Image (tube, rainbow, N blue to C red):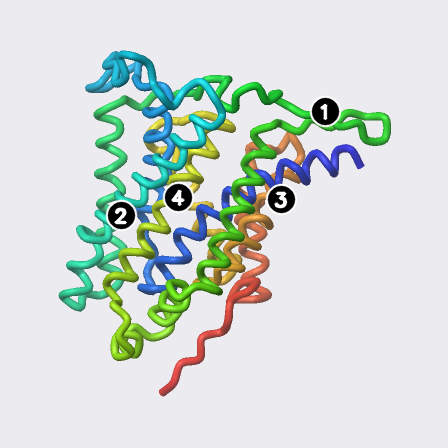
Amino acid sequence: MTELLQNLINGLAIGSVYAIFALGYTLVFSILGIINFAHGAVFTLGAYFTYTLVVGQFENNGLIKGVNLFPAGSPFHGSAWAFAAAAVIGALLSGVVAVIIERLAFRPMRARGADPLLALVSSLGVALVIVNLIQILVGAESYSFPTDIYGDLKPALILHVGGKLVVVRTVQVIIFAVSMVLLLILGYVIGRTRTGKALRAVAENPGTASLLGISVERFIVITFFLSGFLGGLAGTLVSTAFSVAGPYFGVAYGLKGLAVIVLGGLGSIPGAVVGGLVIGLAEAFVPAQYSAYKDAVAFALLFVILLLRPQGLLGRLQIQKV
C-alpha cells in the first residue's frame, strides 16, 4: 500500500505536467489540424526564460557566459512569490514566441494553401533553429534552480502510512496543484466564455465561423499564444523538479506530448488531460530496476490502447462524407 501510494503521487505529478504540455499540441491541432513540432522548443524556452529571470547569468558556456544580467541582484529571487512572477513572465514570453512561430512557419503556408505536411516540416525547422540558438547563447550544459525558490516551504512532506513513510516532495504538490488550476481555468475559458465559444467555432468550421463575423486569424493567434503559455509554464515546472537539462530536453517531452494527445484522442481537451495522467501513472508504476525502460512502457500502453480504440480514449471517430 505504501509503495502504491508513493507511485500514485509520483504519477499524478508528472502526468499533470504531461497534460498541460499536451494541451498546447491539442489546441493548435483542433484549430489547424496539424502538429506544431516547435512546441517542444517553446517548452525549453519557458524553462530558460524563468531561469534567466531568477538567476540572471549562465556560468558554464555560450556567448553570454558570465554576463550578469541583473548587477544589483535579480528582483525575481528570494521568495516564492517572486519565483511565481518569474514563472508567469517566462510563460508569457513563451506565448509571444509561439505567436512569432505562427507568423513565420504557419501563416505563410496557409496563405499559399500549402499541404499541411509542409507546415509541419516548417515548424520542425523553426524548432531546430530555436534549440541551436539556445545552445549558442548558453551552451549545452544543464542548470539547476536555487533550492530556495519556493521560499521557506519544506523540501518534502513525510506521511506515515501503515507504519511506513511516504515521501512527497513539495515540488510535486506544487506541480500538481498548479496544473490542476490551469486545467480548470482553461476548461472554463473554452467552455463558458465568448472567446472559448469562438475558438470552438473556428475549430469546427473556419469558413462558417468567418461568415458569422469571427476573425479566424485573430483566434488562431490567441490559440498559439495559449499553446505557448502552457508549454512554457510546463517547461518551468519540470525544470524545478529536475533541472534545465540543456537545449534539447524539450525534445523528449515533445515526443511524450504527441503520445499523450494520440492516446487521449486528437483534438480532445479532456482527452489530453486523461492521456497525460494515464501515461504519467504508467511510468510511475514501472519498477525501479526497470526505470530505464519506462518510456517503452508508456508507448507500449499507447500501442495497445490504439489497437483496441483507434480514436483514442476520448476521441471521436471521424466520419468522411463522400
> Which residue has dot 2 on it?
124
Q: Which mark is residue 78?
A: none
Q: Where is residue 113 in the image (x, y as percent from the top left)?
A: 17, 68
Residue 66 falls in image quadrant: top left
Q: What's the CA distance linking mark 1 and mark 2?
A: 43 Å
Relative image position of residue 78 (x, y in whole percent): 44, 18
The CA distance from mark 3 to mark 2 is: 29 Å
Residue to which mark 3 is pinned: 281
Residue placed at 43% from the left, 41% from the top? 253
From the viewer's perspective, is residue 145 above or below residue 71?
Answer: below
Mark 1 Cα-neighbour bin, 10 Å: few <14, some 14–19, many ≥20: few
Labels 3 and 1 touching (C-beta < 8 A): no
Nearer the observer, disc 3 or disc 1? 1
Give the residue displayed 58% in from the left and 52% down from the top.
Answer: 301
- 232 or 131: nearer the viewer: 232
Q: Do the residues labelled 3 and 2 touch (CB within 8 Å)?
A: no
Which of disc 1 and disc 4 is earlier in sequence?
A: 1
Q: Where is residue 291 in the image (x, y as percent from the top left)?
A: 59, 33
Q: How far apart are marks 4 and 3 (CA)?
A: 20 Å
Q: Mark 4 points at which residue?
A: 231
Residue holding disc 1: 158
Q: Pointer 4: residues within 10 angstroms few (<14), some, or many (20+)?
A: many
Closest to the camera, between mark 1 and mark 2, is: 1
- Whole-angstrom CA distance, mark 4 to mark 2, is 16 Å
Residue that extends furthest to the right in the rendered view of this protein? 163
Could you tell which of marks 1 and 2 lies nearer the N-terminus? Answer: 2
In the picture, the quarter occupied by the N terminus is top right
